[in-house]
Amino acid sequence: MSADALLDRSLTEQVAALRAREVTSAALTEAALARIGRDNPRLNAGITVDRVAALSAAAAIDAKRSAGAEIGPLSGVPVGLKDMICTEGLRTTAASKILDTFIPPYDATVAARIRSAGGVIVGKLNQDEFAMGSSNENSAYGPVRNPVDETRSPGGSSGGSAAAVAARHCALTLGTDTGGSIRQPASFCGVVGVKPTYGRVSRWGVVAFASSLDQVGPLTATVEDAAIALDVLMGHDPKDSTSIVGAPESVAAALDRGVGGLKIGIPAEYFTQGCDEEVAAAVRKALSTYERLGATLVDVSLPHTPYAVATYYLIATAEASSNLARYDGVRYGRRAEAYSGLADMYGRSRAEGFGDEVKRRVMLGTYALSAGYYDAYYLKAQRVRTLISRDFARAFERCDVIAAPTSPVTAIGLGERVADPLQMYLLDVFTIPASLAGLPCMSLPCADRDGGGLPIGLQLIAPPLQEGRMISAAAAYEREVSHG
Ligand code: GLN
Protein backbone atom coordinates (compact mmCIF):
# COMPACT_ATOMS: atom_id res chain seq x y z
CA MET A 1 0.00 0.00 0.00
CA SER A 2 1.30 3.49 -0.80
CA ALA A 3 2.12 5.85 2.03
CA ASP A 4 -0.68 8.13 0.85
CA ALA A 5 -3.26 5.32 0.91
CA LEU A 6 -2.08 4.35 4.41
CA LEU A 7 -3.09 7.81 5.65
CA ASP A 8 -6.71 6.76 5.08
CA ARG A 9 -6.26 3.88 7.52
CA SER A 10 -6.41 3.90 11.29
CA LEU A 11 -3.53 4.69 13.63
CA THR A 12 -3.41 0.99 14.53
CA GLU A 13 -2.97 0.02 10.88
CA GLN A 14 -0.36 2.72 10.34
CA VAL A 15 1.61 1.45 13.33
CA ALA A 16 1.39 -2.13 12.05
CA ALA A 17 2.65 -1.13 8.60
CA LEU A 18 5.54 0.83 10.10
CA ARG A 19 6.49 -2.09 12.35
CA ALA A 20 6.35 -4.51 9.44
CA ARG A 21 8.55 -2.07 7.51
CA GLU A 22 6.03 -1.84 4.72
CA VAL A 23 6.45 1.90 4.86
CA THR A 24 8.95 4.26 6.47
CA SER A 25 8.04 7.00 8.86
CA ALA A 26 9.71 9.45 6.46
CA ALA A 27 7.45 8.35 3.58
CA LEU A 28 4.31 8.48 5.74
CA THR A 29 5.27 11.90 7.10
CA GLU A 30 6.01 13.17 3.60
CA ALA A 31 2.59 11.93 2.46
CA ALA A 32 0.89 13.65 5.39
CA LEU A 33 2.72 16.91 4.65
CA ALA A 34 1.65 16.66 1.00
CA ARG A 35 -2.01 16.24 2.01
CA ILE A 36 -1.77 19.12 4.43
CA GLY A 37 -0.21 21.26 1.70
CA ARG A 38 -3.01 20.31 -0.67
CA ASP A 39 -5.95 20.81 1.73
CA ASN A 40 -4.88 23.48 4.16
CA PRO A 41 -5.49 26.47 1.88
CA ARG A 42 -9.13 25.34 1.80
CA LEU A 43 -9.72 23.74 5.20
CA ASN A 44 -7.41 25.96 7.27
CA ALA A 45 -7.02 23.19 9.84
CA GLY A 46 -3.38 23.99 10.55
CA ILE A 47 -1.74 27.17 11.83
CA THR A 48 1.92 26.11 11.62
CA VAL A 49 3.43 23.23 9.68
CA ASP A 50 6.79 21.98 10.86
CA ARG A 51 8.08 20.35 7.70
CA VAL A 52 11.81 20.28 8.37
CA ALA A 53 11.66 19.12 11.97
CA ALA A 54 8.96 16.53 11.18
CA LEU A 55 10.97 14.96 8.37
CA SER A 56 14.11 14.88 10.46
CA ALA A 57 12.26 13.30 13.42
CA ALA A 58 10.81 10.70 11.05
CA ALA A 59 14.23 9.96 9.54
CA ALA A 60 15.68 9.53 13.04
CA ILE A 61 12.94 7.01 13.89
CA ASP A 62 13.57 5.10 10.66
CA ALA A 63 17.29 4.98 11.41
CA LYS A 64 16.60 3.71 14.93
CA ARG A 65 14.30 1.03 13.58
CA SER A 66 16.87 -0.05 10.99
CA ALA A 67 19.41 -0.37 13.79
CA GLY A 68 17.03 -2.76 15.52
CA ALA A 69 16.08 -0.40 18.36
CA GLU A 70 12.65 -0.51 19.97
CA ILE A 71 10.32 2.35 18.87
CA GLY A 72 7.44 3.36 21.13
CA PRO A 73 3.77 2.54 20.53
CA LEU A 74 3.30 5.37 18.01
CA SER A 75 6.08 3.91 15.83
CA GLY A 76 6.69 7.00 13.68
CA VAL A 77 3.12 8.05 12.82
CA PRO A 78 2.42 11.73 12.00
CA VAL A 79 0.60 13.56 14.82
CA GLY A 80 -0.90 17.07 14.95
CA LEU A 81 -1.26 19.11 18.14
CA LYS A 82 -3.78 21.80 18.98
CA ASP A 83 -1.99 25.12 19.16
CA MET A 84 -2.65 25.34 22.91
CA ILE A 85 0.12 22.80 23.50
CA CYS A 86 3.64 24.19 23.87
CA THR A 87 6.25 22.71 21.58
CA GLU A 88 9.92 23.44 22.04
CA GLY A 89 11.22 25.68 19.27
CA LEU A 90 7.88 25.58 17.44
CA ARG A 91 5.52 28.54 17.47
CA THR A 92 2.53 28.12 19.78
CA THR A 93 -0.14 30.77 19.28
CA ALA A 94 -3.31 29.59 21.07
CA ALA A 95 -4.81 31.06 17.85
CA SER A 96 -4.30 34.53 19.33
CA LYS A 97 -2.54 37.52 17.85
CA ILE A 98 -1.08 38.14 21.28
CA LEU A 99 1.03 34.97 20.95
CA ASP A 100 1.66 35.27 17.21
CA THR A 101 5.42 35.20 17.66
CA PHE A 102 5.66 33.05 20.79
CA ILE A 103 8.16 30.20 20.52
CA PRO A 104 8.12 28.07 23.68
CA PRO A 105 11.46 27.10 25.18
CA TYR A 106 10.11 23.70 26.24
CA ASP A 107 7.69 20.93 25.32
CA ALA A 108 4.44 20.45 27.21
CA THR A 109 4.48 17.09 28.99
CA VAL A 110 1.93 15.73 26.49
CA ALA A 111 4.09 16.82 23.53
CA ALA A 112 7.11 15.16 25.13
CA ARG A 113 5.08 11.98 25.70
CA ILE A 114 3.99 11.92 22.05
CA ARG A 115 7.58 12.29 20.92
CA SER A 116 8.98 9.67 23.24
CA ALA A 117 6.26 7.24 22.15
CA GLY A 118 7.50 7.64 18.57
CA GLY A 119 4.97 10.21 17.33
CA VAL A 120 6.17 12.66 14.68
CA ILE A 121 4.75 16.13 15.33
CA VAL A 122 3.93 17.58 11.92
CA GLY A 123 2.33 20.82 13.00
CA LYS A 124 0.05 22.89 15.17
CA LEU A 125 -3.67 22.95 14.64
CA ASN A 126 -6.19 25.72 14.42
CA GLN A 127 -8.69 26.36 17.22
CA ASP A 128 -10.76 29.10 18.79
CA GLU A 129 -8.59 31.77 20.39
CA PHE A 130 -7.47 30.50 23.82
CA ALA A 131 -9.93 27.62 23.26
CA MET A 132 -12.88 29.95 23.80
CA GLY A 133 -15.57 28.97 21.37
CA SER A 134 -17.67 26.21 19.89
CA SER A 135 -17.25 26.74 16.14
CA ASN A 136 -13.59 27.60 15.53
CA GLU A 137 -14.75 31.00 14.27
CA ASN A 138 -12.96 32.82 17.09
CA SER A 139 -9.49 32.08 15.71
CA ALA A 140 -7.16 34.97 14.83
CA TYR A 141 -6.08 32.71 11.94
CA GLY A 142 -9.54 32.34 10.43
CA PRO A 143 -12.21 29.65 10.66
CA VAL A 144 -11.71 25.99 9.82
CA ARG A 145 -13.97 24.21 7.34
CA ASN A 146 -15.56 20.89 8.21
CA PRO A 147 -14.16 18.23 5.82
CA VAL A 148 -17.54 16.44 5.84
CA ASP A 149 -19.27 19.54 4.45
CA GLU A 150 -17.05 22.53 3.80
CA THR A 151 -19.85 25.04 4.23
CA ARG A 152 -20.06 23.99 7.88
CA SER A 153 -18.10 24.54 11.05
CA PRO A 154 -15.96 21.67 12.36
CA GLY A 155 -17.03 22.66 15.88
CA GLY A 156 -14.74 24.08 18.50
CA SER A 157 -12.63 24.86 20.10
CA SER A 158 -10.44 21.97 18.84
CA GLY A 159 -11.84 22.41 15.31
CA GLY A 160 -8.50 21.99 13.55
CA SER A 161 -7.74 18.82 15.52
CA ALA A 162 -11.06 17.22 14.52
CA ALA A 163 -10.83 18.40 10.90
CA ALA A 164 -7.26 17.07 10.54
CA VAL A 165 -8.42 13.59 11.58
CA ALA A 166 -11.59 13.74 9.44
CA ALA A 167 -9.54 14.83 6.41
CA ARG A 168 -7.05 12.06 7.21
CA HIS A 169 -4.06 14.32 7.52
CA CYS A 170 -3.13 12.60 10.75
CA ALA A 171 -4.62 9.51 12.39
CA LEU A 172 -4.03 11.15 15.77
CA THR A 173 -4.32 14.71 16.93
CA LEU A 174 -4.49 16.20 20.41
CA GLY A 175 -7.11 18.66 21.53
CA THR A 176 -8.04 20.29 24.81
CA ASP A 177 -11.47 20.15 26.42
CA THR A 178 -12.65 22.64 29.02
CA GLY A 179 -16.39 22.44 28.42
CA GLY A 180 -16.64 20.22 25.37
CA SER A 181 -13.85 21.29 23.03
CA ILE A 182 -12.73 17.75 22.16
CA ARG A 183 -16.12 16.02 22.17
CA GLN A 184 -18.18 18.59 20.27
CA PRO A 185 -15.79 18.95 17.28
CA ALA A 186 -15.37 15.15 17.23
CA SER A 187 -19.16 14.92 17.00
CA PHE A 188 -19.39 17.56 14.21
CA CYS A 189 -16.63 15.92 12.14
CA GLY A 190 -17.57 12.27 12.68
CA VAL A 191 -14.47 11.22 14.61
CA VAL A 192 -13.70 9.90 18.11
CA GLY A 193 -12.66 12.35 20.84
CA VAL A 194 -11.90 11.61 24.48
CA LYS A 195 -11.65 13.91 27.49
CA PRO A 196 -9.99 11.94 30.28
CA THR A 197 -10.73 12.34 34.00
CA TYR A 198 -9.58 15.76 35.24
CA GLY A 199 -5.98 15.30 36.40
CA ARG A 200 -5.36 12.07 34.49
CA VAL A 201 -3.38 13.83 31.74
CA SER A 202 -0.81 16.50 32.51
CA ARG A 203 -1.67 20.13 31.80
CA TRP A 204 1.93 21.25 32.19
CA GLY A 205 2.95 23.36 29.22
CA VAL A 206 -0.61 23.65 27.94
CA VAL A 207 -1.85 27.22 27.59
CA ALA A 208 -4.26 27.69 30.50
CA PHE A 209 -7.88 28.71 29.87
CA ALA A 210 -9.85 27.54 32.92
CA SER A 211 -7.47 25.54 35.06
CA SER A 212 -10.04 23.63 37.10
CA LEU A 213 -11.58 22.26 33.89
CA ASP A 214 -8.87 22.03 31.19
CA GLN A 215 -7.86 18.54 30.03
CA VAL A 216 -5.90 17.28 27.03
CA GLY A 217 -7.14 14.29 25.05
CA PRO A 218 -6.90 12.48 21.73
CA LEU A 219 -8.96 12.74 18.54
CA THR A 220 -8.79 9.70 16.28
CA ALA A 221 -10.76 7.86 13.61
CA THR A 222 -11.45 4.79 15.77
CA VAL A 223 -11.98 3.89 19.42
CA GLU A 224 -9.04 1.49 19.42
CA ASP A 225 -6.79 4.33 18.22
CA ALA A 226 -8.04 6.53 21.03
CA ALA A 227 -7.18 3.79 23.54
CA ILE A 228 -3.62 3.56 22.26
CA ALA A 229 -3.25 7.32 22.47
CA LEU A 230 -4.70 7.46 26.00
CA ASP A 231 -2.14 4.94 27.20
CA VAL A 232 0.57 7.23 25.85
CA LEU A 233 -0.89 10.40 27.38
CA MET A 234 -2.17 9.35 30.80
CA GLY A 235 -0.03 9.24 33.91
CA HIS A 236 1.26 11.23 36.83
CA ASP A 237 3.28 14.37 36.20
CA PRO A 238 4.95 16.00 39.21
CA LYS A 239 5.06 19.28 37.25
CA ASP A 240 1.24 19.57 37.30
CA SER A 241 -0.05 20.04 40.84
CA THR A 242 -3.48 18.68 39.88
CA SER A 243 -2.06 15.55 38.28
CA ILE A 244 -3.45 12.34 39.76
CA VAL A 245 -0.83 10.26 41.54
CA GLY A 246 -0.47 6.60 40.65
CA ALA A 247 -0.16 4.61 37.47
CA PRO A 248 -3.28 4.35 35.32
CA GLU A 249 -4.55 0.99 34.14
CA SER A 250 -4.06 0.33 30.45
CA VAL A 251 -7.09 1.47 28.47
CA ALA A 252 -6.10 -0.58 25.42
CA ALA A 253 -6.17 -3.70 27.59
CA ALA A 254 -9.86 -3.01 28.31
CA LEU A 255 -10.89 -2.76 24.65
CA ASP A 256 -12.40 -6.21 24.28
CA ARG A 257 -14.31 -6.40 27.53
CA GLY A 258 -17.69 -6.00 25.84
CA VAL A 259 -20.90 -4.70 27.37
CA GLY A 260 -22.64 -7.86 28.57
CA GLY A 261 -24.28 -6.97 31.90
CA LEU A 262 -23.24 -3.30 31.63
CA LYS A 263 -25.82 -0.86 33.00
CA ILE A 264 -26.10 2.22 30.80
CA GLY A 265 -27.76 5.26 32.34
CA ILE A 266 -29.94 7.41 30.12
CA PRO A 267 -30.44 10.93 31.46
CA ALA A 268 -33.86 12.22 30.41
CA GLU A 269 -32.59 15.82 30.60
CA TYR A 270 -30.25 15.22 27.64
CA PHE A 271 -32.99 14.32 25.22
CA THR A 272 -34.96 17.53 25.66
CA GLN A 273 -33.23 20.91 26.18
CA GLY A 274 -33.37 21.85 22.51
CA CYS A 275 -32.06 18.50 21.28
CA ASP A 276 -32.70 18.04 17.58
CA GLU A 277 -35.10 15.16 16.84
CA GLU A 278 -32.75 13.47 14.38
CA VAL A 279 -29.92 13.61 16.89
CA ALA A 280 -32.08 12.10 19.64
CA ALA A 281 -33.30 9.38 17.27
CA ALA A 282 -29.79 8.37 16.20
CA VAL A 283 -28.66 8.19 19.82
CA ARG A 284 -31.73 6.14 20.80
CA LYS A 285 -30.96 3.74 18.01
CA ALA A 286 -27.39 3.38 19.30
CA LEU A 287 -28.86 2.60 22.72
CA SER A 288 -30.97 -0.17 21.29
CA THR A 289 -27.80 -1.59 19.71
CA TYR A 290 -26.33 -1.68 23.21
CA GLU A 291 -29.35 -3.56 24.48
CA ARG A 292 -28.94 -6.10 21.73
CA LEU A 293 -25.30 -6.51 22.79
CA GLY A 294 -26.37 -7.43 26.32
CA ALA A 295 -26.33 -4.09 28.12
CA THR A 296 -29.25 -2.90 30.26
CA LEU A 297 -30.63 0.60 29.90
CA VAL A 298 -31.51 2.42 33.11
CA ASP A 299 -33.27 5.77 33.38
CA VAL A 300 -31.27 8.23 35.45
CA SER A 301 -31.80 11.86 36.29
CA LEU A 302 -29.31 14.72 36.30
CA PRO A 303 -31.67 17.38 37.61
CA HIS A 304 -29.20 20.28 37.76
CA THR A 305 -28.40 20.05 34.03
CA PRO A 306 -30.33 23.25 33.20
CA TYR A 307 -27.93 25.26 35.40
CA ALA A 308 -24.71 23.87 33.95
CA VAL A 309 -24.15 26.35 31.13
CA ALA A 310 -24.59 29.38 33.40
CA THR A 311 -22.36 27.79 36.04
CA TYR A 312 -19.65 27.03 33.51
CA TYR A 313 -19.67 30.50 32.01
CA LEU A 314 -19.10 32.01 35.47
CA ILE A 315 -16.36 29.62 36.55
CA ALA A 316 -14.58 29.39 33.19
CA THR A 317 -14.59 33.14 32.62
CA ALA A 318 -13.43 33.83 36.19
CA GLU A 319 -10.50 31.47 35.80
CA ALA A 320 -9.74 32.78 32.32
CA SER A 321 -9.64 36.38 33.51
CA SER A 322 -7.02 35.36 36.04
CA ASN A 323 -5.03 33.09 33.69
CA LEU A 324 -4.95 35.65 30.90
CA ALA A 325 -3.56 38.38 33.15
CA ARG A 326 -0.10 37.10 32.24
CA TYR A 327 -0.42 38.41 28.66
CA ASP A 328 0.66 41.89 29.52
CA GLY A 329 3.08 42.74 26.72
CA VAL A 330 6.02 42.11 29.04
CA ARG A 331 6.44 38.38 29.48
CA TYR A 332 4.91 36.77 26.41
CA GLY A 333 4.29 37.62 22.81
CA ARG A 334 3.04 40.88 21.44
CA ARG A 335 3.62 44.35 22.86
CA ALA A 336 1.93 47.46 21.48
CA GLU A 337 4.34 49.60 19.49
CA ALA A 338 3.16 53.00 20.63
CA TYR A 339 2.21 53.75 24.24
CA SER A 340 2.74 56.27 27.00
CA GLY A 341 3.63 54.69 30.31
CA LEU A 342 3.23 51.23 31.78
CA ALA A 343 -0.54 51.08 32.27
CA ASP A 344 -1.08 52.32 28.74
CA MET A 345 1.35 49.69 27.43
CA TYR A 346 -0.58 46.91 29.20
CA GLY A 347 -3.90 48.25 27.99
CA ARG A 348 -2.88 48.71 24.38
CA SER A 349 -1.02 45.39 24.14
CA ARG A 350 -4.10 43.56 25.38
CA ALA A 351 -6.54 45.63 23.33
CA GLU A 352 -4.55 44.90 20.16
CA GLY A 353 -3.66 41.31 20.96
CA PHE A 354 -6.96 39.77 22.14
CA GLY A 355 -9.99 39.12 19.96
CA ASP A 356 -13.58 40.08 20.83
CA GLU A 357 -14.64 36.80 22.49
CA VAL A 358 -11.54 36.72 24.69
CA LYS A 359 -12.18 40.30 25.77
CA ARG A 360 -15.81 39.48 26.50
CA ARG A 361 -14.78 36.60 28.73
CA VAL A 362 -12.08 38.52 30.56
CA MET A 363 -14.63 41.24 31.32
CA LEU A 364 -17.29 38.74 32.42
CA GLY A 365 -14.80 36.88 34.61
CA THR A 366 -13.36 40.00 36.17
CA TYR A 367 -16.87 41.19 36.96
CA ALA A 368 -17.85 37.84 38.51
CA LEU A 369 -14.78 37.91 40.75
CA SER A 370 -14.98 41.54 41.79
CA ALA A 371 -15.67 42.60 45.36
CA GLY A 372 -19.38 42.63 46.12
CA TYR A 373 -20.22 40.23 43.29
CA TYR A 374 -17.98 37.34 44.26
CA ASP A 375 -20.53 35.71 46.61
CA ALA A 376 -23.45 36.29 44.28
CA TYR A 377 -21.75 34.83 41.20
CA TYR A 378 -18.51 32.92 41.63
CA LEU A 379 -19.25 31.34 44.99
CA LYS A 380 -22.80 30.49 43.95
CA ALA A 381 -21.48 28.91 40.77
CA GLN A 382 -19.06 26.78 42.78
CA ARG A 383 -21.96 25.54 44.88
CA VAL A 384 -24.00 24.62 41.85
CA ARG A 385 -20.94 22.85 40.47
CA THR A 386 -21.01 20.64 43.56
CA LEU A 387 -24.70 19.89 43.00
CA ILE A 388 -23.95 18.89 39.40
CA SER A 389 -21.16 16.54 40.58
CA ARG A 390 -23.57 15.01 43.10
CA ASP A 391 -26.14 14.42 40.36
CA PHE A 392 -23.57 12.29 38.57
CA ALA A 393 -22.44 10.48 41.72
CA ARG A 394 -26.06 9.57 42.43
CA ALA A 395 -26.66 8.44 38.86
CA PHE A 396 -23.58 6.23 38.98
CA GLU A 397 -25.06 4.39 41.97
CA ARG A 398 -27.51 2.96 39.45
CA CYS A 399 -25.43 2.58 36.29
CA ASP A 400 -21.89 1.96 35.03
CA VAL A 401 -21.74 4.52 32.25
CA ILE A 402 -24.05 7.26 31.02
CA ALA A 403 -24.95 7.63 27.34
CA ALA A 404 -26.41 10.73 25.70
CA PRO A 405 -26.02 12.96 22.66
CA THR A 406 -22.75 14.92 22.53
CA SER A 407 -24.30 18.01 20.99
CA PRO A 408 -27.96 18.95 20.59
CA VAL A 409 -27.38 19.65 16.89
CA THR A 410 -25.18 18.51 14.01
CA ALA A 411 -22.49 20.75 12.49
CA ILE A 412 -23.73 24.33 12.25
CA GLY A 413 -23.19 26.42 9.12
CA LEU A 414 -20.20 28.76 9.15
CA GLY A 415 -21.38 32.19 10.22
CA GLU A 416 -24.68 30.83 11.51
CA ARG A 417 -24.30 31.72 15.19
CA VAL A 418 -21.42 34.21 15.32
CA ALA A 419 -23.68 37.18 15.93
CA ASP A 420 -25.28 35.59 19.00
CA PRO A 421 -22.82 34.47 21.69
CA LEU A 422 -25.61 33.04 23.84
CA GLN A 423 -26.78 30.71 21.06
CA MET A 424 -23.15 29.68 20.64
CA TYR A 425 -22.79 28.96 24.38
CA LEU A 426 -25.91 26.80 24.28
CA LEU A 427 -24.17 24.38 21.90
CA ASP A 428 -22.34 23.11 24.98
CA VAL A 429 -25.37 22.09 27.09
CA PHE A 430 -24.58 18.38 26.99
CA THR A 431 -20.80 18.53 27.24
CA ILE A 432 -20.40 21.05 30.04
CA PRO A 433 -21.91 19.05 32.95
CA ALA A 434 -19.34 16.22 32.76
CA SER A 435 -16.58 18.82 32.53
CA LEU A 436 -17.80 20.54 35.69
CA ALA A 437 -17.81 17.15 37.42
CA GLY A 438 -14.30 16.32 36.13
CA LEU A 439 -15.49 13.01 34.66
CA PRO A 440 -14.02 11.00 31.78
CA CYS A 441 -16.21 11.36 28.72
CA MET A 442 -16.01 10.91 25.00
CA SER A 443 -17.82 11.26 21.72
CA LEU A 444 -17.98 8.60 19.03
CA PRO A 445 -19.96 8.64 15.80
CA CYS A 446 -23.44 7.11 15.78
CA ALA A 447 -24.09 4.71 12.93
CA ASP A 448 -26.76 7.06 11.56
CA ARG A 449 -26.18 10.53 10.16
CA ASP A 450 -28.74 13.31 9.86
CA GLY A 451 -30.80 13.92 6.72
CA GLY A 452 -28.04 16.14 5.31
CA GLY A 453 -25.39 13.44 5.78
CA LEU A 454 -23.82 15.11 8.81
CA PRO A 455 -22.35 12.98 11.61
CA ILE A 456 -24.07 12.62 15.00
CA GLY A 457 -22.05 12.10 18.15
CA LEU A 458 -22.85 9.60 20.89
CA GLN A 459 -21.47 10.76 24.21
CA LEU A 460 -20.37 8.32 26.91
CA ILE A 461 -19.62 9.51 30.44
CA ALA A 462 -18.01 7.32 33.13
CA PRO A 463 -17.18 7.63 36.83
CA PRO A 464 -13.76 9.09 37.72
CA LEU A 465 -10.79 7.07 36.39
CA GLN A 466 -13.02 4.64 34.51
CA GLU A 467 -11.57 5.43 31.07
CA GLY A 468 -11.18 1.68 30.46
CA ARG A 469 -14.85 0.96 31.13
CA MET A 470 -15.91 3.85 28.91
CA ILE A 471 -13.59 2.86 26.05
CA SER A 472 -14.64 -0.79 26.18
CA ALA A 473 -18.29 0.29 25.88
CA ALA A 474 -17.41 2.55 22.94
CA ALA A 475 -15.41 -0.20 21.25
CA ALA A 476 -18.29 -2.69 21.56
CA TYR A 477 -20.62 -0.32 19.73
CA GLU A 478 -18.07 0.55 17.08
CA ARG A 479 -17.36 -3.14 16.38
CA GLU A 480 -21.06 -3.88 16.08
CA VAL A 481 -21.91 -1.06 13.69
CA SER A 482 -18.81 -1.36 11.53
CA HIS A 483 -18.98 -5.14 11.12
CA GLY A 484 -22.63 -5.82 11.93
N1 GLN B 1 -17.30 25.97 23.86
C1 GLN B 1 -16.91 26.12 25.23
C2 GLN B 1 -16.39 27.50 25.45
O1 GLN B 1 -16.46 28.27 24.58
C3 GLN B 1 -15.91 25.07 25.60
C4 GLN B 1 -14.55 25.40 25.15
C5 GLN B 1 -13.55 24.42 25.55
O2 GLN B 1 -13.88 23.30 25.97
N2 GLN B 1 -12.30 24.82 25.48
O3 GLN B 1 -15.88 27.82 26.48
Image (tube, rainbow, N blue to C red):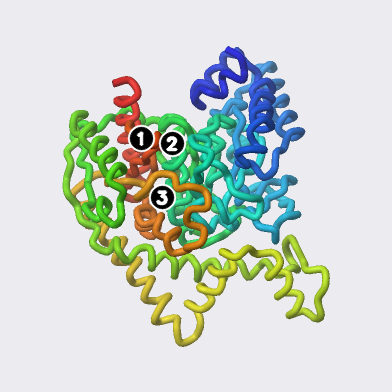
Number of the label disc, if any, that sits on residue 449 = 1
Q: Is residue 268 visible?
A: yes
Residue under the point 49% across and 40% down: 218
The answer to whether the beta carbon of the residue marked 1 is less than 8 Å from any atom of ligand 1 is no
Q: Which sits earlier in the primary sequence, circle 1 or circle 2?
A: 2
Residue under pointer 3: 197
Disc 3 marks a residue whose amino acid type is: Thr
Label 1 element class? loop
Label 3 element class? loop
Q: For the residues carrying marks 1 and 2, which lies nearer the camera in this image?
A: 1
Instruction: Say left or right for 103 vs 297.
Output: right
CA separation in Å, label 3 and label 1:
28 Å
Foreground residue among 227 and 174: 174
Q: Residues within 10 Å of mark 2 (few under 14, many from 20)?
A: many
Q: Residues within 10 Å of mark 1 (few under 14, many from 20)?
A: some
Res 169 → quadrant: top right
Disc 1 marks a residue whose amino acid type is: Arg
Q: In this view, does 400 lie above or below 79?
A: below
Label 2 element class? loop
Residue under pointer 2: 190
Disc 2 marks a residue whose amino acid type is: Gly
